[in-house]
Image: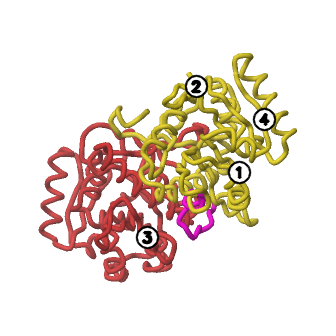
Chain colours: A yellow, B red
Amino acid sequence: MATTNPAGLVRPIAVIGGTGPAGMGLALRWARAGETVIIGSRNEERAQQTAAAIQRRAGPDAIVSGMENAAACAAADILMLTVPFEGQATLLKELKPAMTAGSILIDATVPLAASVGGRASRTLGVWQGSAAQQAAELVPKEVSVVAAFHNVSADMLNGDAPLDCDVIVCSNDADASQLTRELAAKIPGVRALDGGPLQNARIVEQITALLIGMNIRYKGHAGVRITGLPPTAYR
Amino acid sequence: MATTNPAGLVRPIAVIGGTGPAGMGLALRWARAGETVIIGSRNEERAQQTAAAIQRRAGPDAIVSGMENAAACAAADILMLTVPFEGQATLLKELKPAMTAGSILIDATVPLAASVGGRASRTLGVWQGSAAQQAAELVPKEVSVVAAFHNVSADMLNGDAPLDCDVIVCSNDADASQLTRELAAKIPGVRALDGGPLQNARIVEQITALLIGMNIRYKGHAGVRITGLPPTAYR
């Protein structure tokens, strides 16, 4: 079942940076779940090639298209941002005019030190507190920012097996948080949890660096499950 | 089986701050696992009362005693520190002369903002990077610091059921890290993982604040499991 608005119209998801591994994986999983997905890329042709590849894997019923980033942004009001930290601010400034009021920006950016030539198992300090809070400063006031999907293995997303991880969702907008948790729960094996206000993204983003260290140490695809909460906590 | 040194002598574990909920819970679980446990407290009598209570719950074979903190420190070379952040530095300065060379200090301190009247779902910035790195600066050079047990629910530790969480262990001393992982794995239901160097404690400590927020939101006893790693990663 695709995500719809109160008028019953399908709400497409634009995956900005959708030709990278995390974006492709999310797009694949959502296309399989019946969502209408738009792959966004700097390069329209590359976006369309990636969309075609996802379409082939997701099957004939999937609805996947490819557009240049700004066009993808303008065509959707659910925006999933999966770009490296070093590109986040510049891209958001560029896309700001294309964002429509009432849109939701789901940010998965992790400020890895690798962005400035350091290690992927370390993070940079972001003035605002987190990459997601930086994003919130750069989008129009009428766009709600949600932080989520930092700790989902791109390799696992691009496979066919169910995942074995939880998605911790942080936002100051309760409705946007809930919609994001519903989207997360459409990925087989994923449970979604309310991680609190957007400022908590600073913790969730850093967990990624810890998991990357474990992946290097143990050669795995580490994820996180939160245990010990009542069943109603998990979506 | 108790932890022993190369000469086959039992190595007691001194739980400094052992009359608090986390310390009591760890002491109970280790006493049940056959470890020799010393409860340390500012107040010797209180230490002995807590030791007696743990002894009653752990059964006649358990070996639990209570001592004033400095005496507990001097009597053991495995020191488990479970005190609120606001007491950590002062206590470590006080105990420094009692620590013996070659000791291991396992630090579970979380720099919660609650330490200065703020929220338990937020952390303070620690100059050294983490409470564990602050600890490393305050103990004698010949004492190895390990960061672990931040994210284990004290309520669950004080119960009888197996736990459902992993313990992420950070240290610059590979042997001390391994010993700590072995101690963690003696708690039913706990798996231990190498979280990398001590500096990574800054991430593990912050996870606690996130879990506390979830406990408040959902009324639970949140813990963390790391998924997606090969079985050899878990002890």
Number of residues whose C-alpha sits closer than 10 Å to that of mark 2, classed few (under 14), some (14–19) or many (20 or more): some
Marks 3/2: CA–CA distance: 46 Å
Subunit of mark 4? A
Let me know if residue B88 is in the magenta part: no
Q: Amino acid at mark 1?
A: Val
- Answer yes or no: do the residues labelled 4 and 1 have beta carbons within 8 Å? no
Marks 4/1: CA–CA distance: 16 Å
- Judge if badges 3 and 1 mark residues of a common chain: no
Sequence order check, earlier mark of 4 and 2: 2
Out of B8 and A226, give the one closest to the viewer: A226
Nearer to us: label 3 or label 4? 4
Out of A150 and B231, give the one closest to the viewer: A150
Marks 3/4: CA–CA distance: 47 Å
Query: To which quarter of the image does residue A113 belong?
Result: bottom right
* Number of the label disc, if any, that sits on residue A83: 1
Subunit of mark 2? A
Number of residues whose C-alpha sits closer than 10 Å to that of mark 4, classed few (under 14), some (14–19) or many (20 or more): many
- In what element is the residue under mark 3? helix
Q: Which residue is mark 3?
A: B131
Marks 4/2: CA–CA distance: 18 Å
Q: Amino acid at mark 4?
A: Gly
